[in-house]
Image (cartoon, rainbow, N blue to C red):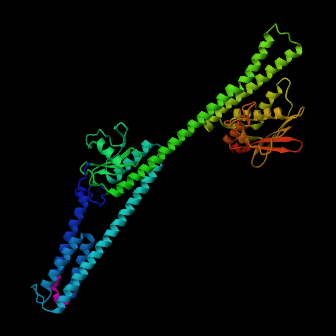
Amino acid sequence: MPHSPADTRLPKQNRWRKGSALVTFSFSTLNLLLLISWLAVVTWLGLAYFAELGVTVITMFYLLGVLWAAYFLRFSAALLTAITAFLLINYCFIEPRFSLGVASTQSWVILLVFAIVALTVSSVMQRLKQQMLQSRQAAQQSRFFQSLAELLAAQSGTETLMQAACQHIAEVFALQARVMRLTEAGELIRLAGSDVQDTTFIPVQAASVEWALDFNRPVGTGTNDWPSLGYCLLPFGFPQREVMVLDASDTMPDLHFLQLLTHQCAQAYIKLSQQIALAQAELAASEANFKKTLLTALSHDMRTPLTVILGAANVLTDRQIPLTEIQSEQLLQSIQAETTYLSQATENILTLVKLDAGASSLQLDWQSPQDVIQHVVSRYQRRSPPEALQVNISDEEVLVRMDAVLVAHALANLIDNAICWRSAGSAIEITLSINDLWLQISVLNKGPGFPEGFAISAFAPHTQRPAGTRGFGLGLSIVNTVMQLHQGTLEISSGPNQQTCVQLMFPFVRASELIAP
């Protein structure tokens, strides 16, 4: 693409609002009229009161006019004011008066000193004015970038982020902004901002967007490349395929500022896109692990008990196989044990599905922990033969905000684990105690305790279990997850005489505290 000369580049002075050029023109005209009036008044006063004022005082008055021009007008206006004042002083107040001739060395010194002071002061004032304008512009730009950063940080989606950026640019600079993407097929897609089909805007050429992306440099109005496009293209940066499109306007800031603006929008867009992609990847991985866990449970842990049940049932129904009463009893007990295991496994799988949904799936309500414990214990007492459970429950009326079904299932998991690992003939002890901070539900049993260095994470749902082990490895991890969702904790300890204690610790309130006075 050929490069065009830079003479069509827009002025670099920022115009923050529409009509600012007209306001600047009116302000300059007013200052010019005031300056001319001041020179006229000083000349009249000097002529009328020359004897009282003298050349020095009149010269100082003219110097004030030069300062006024240097501060409120351009340097050229200040220079013209100095030359005009020099000629007026020479013509009206330097001997011979009303002539451009200079009669004495003293008069020459006065004129030269005035000229030097006027030019020096004008130059210094112009630099000071330029620094002040730059400082004010930097402060305005800093406030704009801060407000833009706060606006972009509040967005939760890439489309809303870009739309908010375009709207903010339109409000601050009165610029029509668009964000567009060039696909691999060469098609332009509008992501945010003004509609690309709007006839009031110059249509964007795909070729110019492709060139800007290939060379990663701005193109169009305010640049050295294709300044007559009628809009400015600012790439987001490699390897992004997005560009910021700004329609040409008198309110357009300088190119460096536009590049900083685009860079900030691009960084926010890329960061949010990466966060969304990461969240989606984590969700997909979590779903994949969850499906893998269920598939493992269904294919391995449930297949074995079903095979045992089917085999035992086939033997019992086959009349050609002679069975003693003891053998038949053993087969029936095997069927009963495997059925119980399947029931517990099914409950664990359903609980795992519910827990995977997180806290949003909980049915929280104020519940009596005594009622939940009695409900679970009664299930074991109705078994044939009933399980040996010793229950010791505090009578203090307290309430826990809980999902009663999940807590009951967690307690049942602990009881089943205690039954499995208890010493022969020993009872399971279940206690409920209350201290100042926690309500504690404890399950104690005598038998081989947890090995040294045991961690609940070793039984996490997605960990690989050793070959030959039976069971889902979900019980303790489910209990731990249930406690986390209830802002509680799970504690495991081993005491003397091979006694193992597992505690569920809940935050609680006393019933009297919920009763309105």
Q: Quadrant of the C terminus?
A: top right
> Is 76 above or below relative to 476?
below
What is the residue that sits farthest to the top in this orientation? Answer: 320
Please say if 289 is above or below 433.
above
Quadrant position of residue 427: top right
Does residue 448 lie above or below 129 as drawn?
A: above
Quadrant for residue 124, please give it.
bottom left
Q: Quadrant of residue 50?
A: bottom left
For the residue pair 111 and 67, the one nearer the viewer reads as 111
State the extent of the magenta-drawn residues as a range: 45-54
Note whether residue 409 is visible.
Answer: yes
Residue at image position (54%, 39%) is: 281
Judge left or right: residue 152 versus residue 373.
Answer: left
Image-based side of 284 in relation to 370, left or right: left
Q: Residue at x 37, y 47 (%)?
A: 166
Q: What's the magenta bit mostly, secondary-structure-wise?
A: helix
Q: Position of residue 250 (x, y in %)?
A: 26, 54
